[in-house]
Image (cartoon, rainbow, N blue to C red):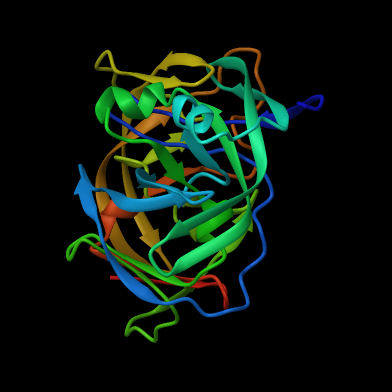
Amino acid sequence: MVDSIRNLRYAGYSGHLLLCTVLVPASLFAAEAQSGSIKMQVRDGRPVVDGVYVNGHGPYRFLVDTGTSVNLILSSVAVKIGMTPTFRINLTSSAGNAVMPGSDDNELRLGPAQADGQRFLLTDLAAVRRLWPDIHGVLGQRFLSQFDYLIDLRRSRLEFGKQDPEGNRTRFTLMDGRTTVSTSLGDLVLDSGAAGLILFGIEPESADGSYLQTVAGSQTIGKVWRSLAIEGRNLWRGLAVALPNREGRAEIEPGIAGLMPLNLFDAVYICNSEGYLVFR
């Protein structure tokens, strides 16, 4: 039986962006070591993996999205494998509101990485499947946060397990279960599902008729010119997407300045067990 509706802020965007940011508590880091390497596809700078199994069913093709706290699965797939909704969530975004069913206590496996107690939201994945109709779901932080892993976009590999890569170690914090980094532009969520840098609460300097679409609605967006630095290192300069606050609405995500796409880097090692990142 589905229990009462829970409130949840959501900031998932698409269009020529693809950002899925669902705010719920992340699960604890898995104690047991699970290691191994998986071949990825890299689509417009965003990682996609085959071989995902949900409750023993699969294989399915999922987007790997470090910017969302829970997992998402195509509603038709959920019905096919007998996934039962156990709750509903009231999603509130800058673009509107929507109610979405979800399911708790599922098993999820990808290569050597396996986790129980997984939460999924059940959705038509319209924003994702408009770009890629072969995607069955999204792997979020509910799963990813339990492992140390490397996303290597240059070599198209996802590697689970503890590593000791060369490079500066950048500490991160968890904001609503998501990996958040202090930058020259404020605290940004590291988002492998994002096509570009997006900044919250910023009035655009230019408009090109673009818009974002969420599961709860849509909103026009614009662009601003910005430079990005982390710990004094200049990393990027260019046009960022500006997402202004809607008139009469509160901040989009209090405490979060925006979303930083993982594709600004060749690879990122996320060490959840010790709370640091290595960019390269």
Counting from the top left corner in percent of width and height, residue 201 is at: 52, 30
Residue 123 in the figure: left or right of residue 43: right
- Could you tell me if residue 226 is visible in this image? yes
Counting from the top left corner in percent of width and height, residue 220 is at: 39, 15
User: Residue 100, relative to residue 168: is it above or below?
Assistant: above
For the N terminus, which image quadrant?
Answer: top right
At 35% from the left edge and 75% from the top edge, which residue is drawn?
A: 36
Residue 25 in the figure: left or right of residue 108: right
Residue 225 in the figure: left or right of residue 173: left
For the C terminus, which image quadrant?
Answer: bottom left
Residue 73 in the figure: left or right of residue 60: right
At 61% from the left edge and 71% from the top edge, which residue is drawn?
A: 30
User: Residue 158, relative to residue 273: is it above or below?
Assistant: above
Residue sticking out furthest to the right: 4
- Could you tell me if residue 205 is visible in this image? no
Residue sticking out furthest to the left: 155
At 30% from the left edge and 40% from the top edge, which residue is drawn?
A: 196
Counting from the top left corner in percent of width and height, residue 125 is at: 42, 26
Is 248 or 232 nearer to us in this picture?
Answer: 248
